[in-house]
Image (cartoon, rainbow, N blue to C red):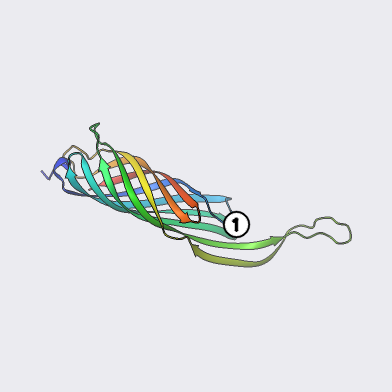
Amino acid sequence: MCFAEVDKIVRTDIGFTIGIPVYSHRDDAFNIEDSRVIIGSFADISFKLGNPLRFLLGADAMCDFMWGGDDYNHHLDYAGWAGIKFYPGIGGLNFSIAYALGCRTDFVSFTERVQVKNPLTGEMLPLYKSESDSYIDSTAWGNGFRISFDYDFLYGNDRNFAPALGGYYRCMPRGNDKWDNIFSIYISFGF
């Protein structure tokens, strides 16, 4: 028999997330939401400090893909974090709080659409396209925090592999009184 979870000193978790990013600063002129997919992942390593505390080091990334026709507005939000995980004694239920350092990179491509007025009748003519433009822009690095909870099916038993189900909230300042708020649910697998 391998070591039971209660005896593990070092543990690794890898997870897959879906969520809702709430951006406080985004160029709304190019807000495209015809089609949207939000996916992410994270990984962490934890070190046993003593029952019921663990020290966490981890990183996560969330990809927010929005597109419509030839235009797109994609966002990649990424952060590294360090904190404490606490098991209050209700099975594998646990909570963590961590300091996070992260950034967001935006990938935007759009075609300007201009509506013109007929000079003779004053009637608005249909839209026509002008030249396309694209750019990549990154926010300032921000110091924020990450709060999570999950139920860990590996905790307190002798299995070597089991899932955990949970969610997290990450608050990241982006400078000039702007904040991004990431709400996510996830499934992770502990080793």
- Name the image quarter holding residue 71: bottom right
Q: Nearer the viewer, residue 51 or 10?
A: 51
Question: What amino acid type is highlighted by mark number 1?
Answer: Phe
Q: Looking at this view, name the residue that lies furthest to the right.
A: 120
Q: Position of residue 92 (x, y in %)?
A: 25, 36
Q: Residue 119, image x and y in percent?
A: 86, 62
User: Residue at point 59% right, 60% down?
Assistant: 70
Residue closest to the eye, 22 or 172: 172
Which image quadrant: the N terminus?
top left
Question: In the displayed image of the protein, which residue is found farthest to the left?
Answer: 1
Q: Which residue is mark 1?
A: 30
Query: In the displayed structure, does residue 58 sit left or right of residue 19?
Result: left
109 versus 87 height, above or below: below
Q: Residue furthest front?
A: 176
Q: Say above or below: 35 vs 6.
A: below
Of all residues, the one furthest to the top in this rendering is: 90
